[in-house]
Image: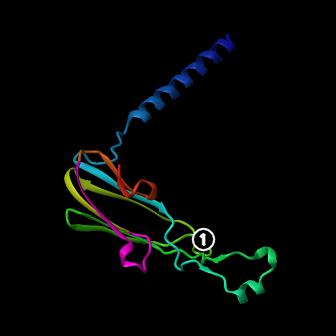
Amino acid sequence: MNRALNWVGQALLYGCFAVALGVLSRWPVYHALPADMAEIKVSFLHYGQRLEDCRPYTDAEKAKMAPNMRRAMKCGRERSPVHIEVDIDGQPVLNHTAKPSGLSRDGASTMYRRLNVPAGERRITVRFQDKMSAADALQSVEKTVDLKPAQVLVIDYEQEKGGVIFQ
């Protein structure tokens, strides 16, 4: 008799736990975005250009180095910060400079930003620069996209795919 009550009590507790779990998994309802909004994610991980160009070692510099440490070229490690600007319908919404990571400032620059915008047709202009000292390093891309409600558009930078990409 006592063993049967234990089983019934355990079944009731497990049942109550299952009902509570089911109710809390469906309520309250979560909406990531309001019904008439879309989201633009600007995200990149990019190594900026080196601040100084590689140059050959002079004979005097080579003479100071151990024979096993001699290389043909000397290349600085420090990289340029990466700058990005985003305009939506002619209005600037993002202006960010990502500094290179690492103790010697020789790592990748990273950035992640979420922008909530009204759904509909939007003209997006992205300006991306990975060498701050060169004016010709600025890459500008303009695209018109039709954003649906709750759609997520990702703006990324991939050198292999031609630079700024929209996906």
In this view, which residue lies farthest toward the bottom? 60
Q: Tell me if residue 84 is in the magenta stretch.
A: no
In-front residue for pair 141/25: 141
Q: Residues within 10 Å of mark 1 (few under 14, many from 20)?
A: few
Above or below 163: residue 150: above
Q: Is residue 46 left or right of residue 84?
A: right
Q: Tell me if residue 141 is in the magenta stretch.
A: yes
Q: Position of residue 154 (x, y in %)?
A: 36, 52
Which amino acid type is marked by label 1? Gly
In this view, which residue lies farthest toward the top? 1
The image quadrant of residue 132 is bottom left
Residue at 35% across, 49% down: 167
In-front residue for pair 153/63: 63
In-front residue for pair 71/30: 71
Looking at the rendered structure, the secondary structure element under dot 1 is loop
Above or below 61: residue 93: above
Above or below 8: residue 154: below
Question: Can you say which quadrant of the picture contains the N terminus?
Answer: top right
**Where does label 1 land, which residue?**
102
Q: Position of residue 161 (x, y in %)?
A: 41, 53
Residue at 74% across, 77% down: 70
The image quadrant of residue 40 is bottom left
In-front residue for pair 167/137: 137
Q: Position of residue 49 (x, y in %)?
A: 49, 71
Residue at 49% across, 69% down: 48
The span shown in magenta is: 129-146
Q: Position of residue 75 (x, y in %)?
A: 61, 76
